[in-house]
């Protein structure tokens, strides 16, 4: 019965080649993952966010970022925030400004129309 042994010179050569290959693979290829850094901006109350406690985040089909906070709904357009809150004297505003826990996004205006019709 023959089995693989590292005692012969030929097998030791293959063992060295395999070790070098594994070392190059393990240490060389992960270095490429570090080169592409994604730009990230910290959005804070100082930059216009209405409240620092965020319960939900969504991005709509037009690229706006929406943040549901304890103090209303915040829309970010990559430059500034617009805050939507409840106004008791205006029936077209949010029904409540507190704890916006979930956001629904639609991929098209027809989907938005379907959602609005079902919620009336």
Image: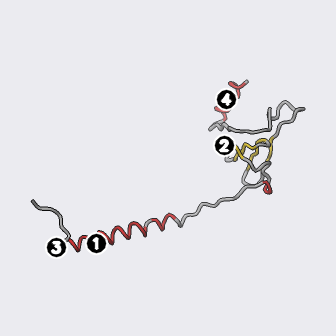
Q: With 108 as the anchor, is 86 left or right in this view?
A: right
Could you tell which of marks 2 and 3 lies nearer the N-terminus?
A: 3
Residue that appears at 58% across and 63% down = 37
Residue that appears at 64% across and 32% down = 111
Q: Please state which of the two labelled residues, at mark 1 or mark 3, is closer to the viewer.
A: 3
Q: According to the image, label 1 marks what residue?
A: 17
Seen from this angle, which residue lies furthest bottom?
9
Find the distance from the CA under tag 4 to the CA under tag 2: 14 Å
Could you tell which of marks 4 and 2 lies nearer the N-terminus?
A: 2
Q: Please state which of the two labelled residues, at mark 4 or mark 1, is closer to the viewer.
A: 1
Q: Which mark is residue 60?
A: 2
Spot occupied by residue 68 in the image (x, y as percentages of width and height): 72, 42
Could you tell which of marks 1 and 3 lies nearer the N-terminus?
A: 3
Residue 92, compared with residue 37, is above or below; it is: above
Find the distance from the CA under tag 1 to the CA under tag 3: 15 Å
User: Helix, strand, or loop for circle 1?
Assistant: helix
Q: According to the image, label 4 marks what residue?
A: 115
The residue closer to the viewer here, 39 or 96, is 96
Spot occupied by residue 21 in the image (x, y as percentages of width and height): 33, 69
Q: Are marks 2 and 3 in contact (CB under 8 Å)?
A: no
Q: Are marks 4 and 1 in contact (CB under 8 Å)?
A: no
Find the distance from the CA under tag 4 to the CA under tag 1: 62 Å
Q: Are marks 1 and 3 in contact (CB under 8 Å)?
A: no
The residue closer to the viewer here, 19 or 86, is 19
Q: Count numbered badges in the picture.
A: 4
């Amino acid at each position: 019965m023959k089995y693989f042994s590292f005692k012969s010179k030929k097998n030791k050569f293959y063992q060295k080649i395999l070790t070098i290959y594994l070392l190059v693979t393990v240490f060389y290829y992960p270095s490429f993952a570090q080169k592409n850094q994604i730009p990230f901006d910290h959005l804070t109350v100082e930059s216009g966010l209405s409240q620092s406690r965020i319960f939900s985040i969504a991005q709509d089909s037009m690229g706006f970022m929406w943040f549901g906070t304890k103090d209303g709904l915040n829309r970010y357009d990559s430059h500034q925030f617009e805050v939507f809150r409840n106004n008791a004297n205006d029936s077209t505003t949010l029904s409540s400004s507190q704890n916006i826990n979930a956001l629904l996004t639609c991929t098209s205006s027809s989907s938005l129309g379907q959602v609005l019709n079902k919620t009336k």
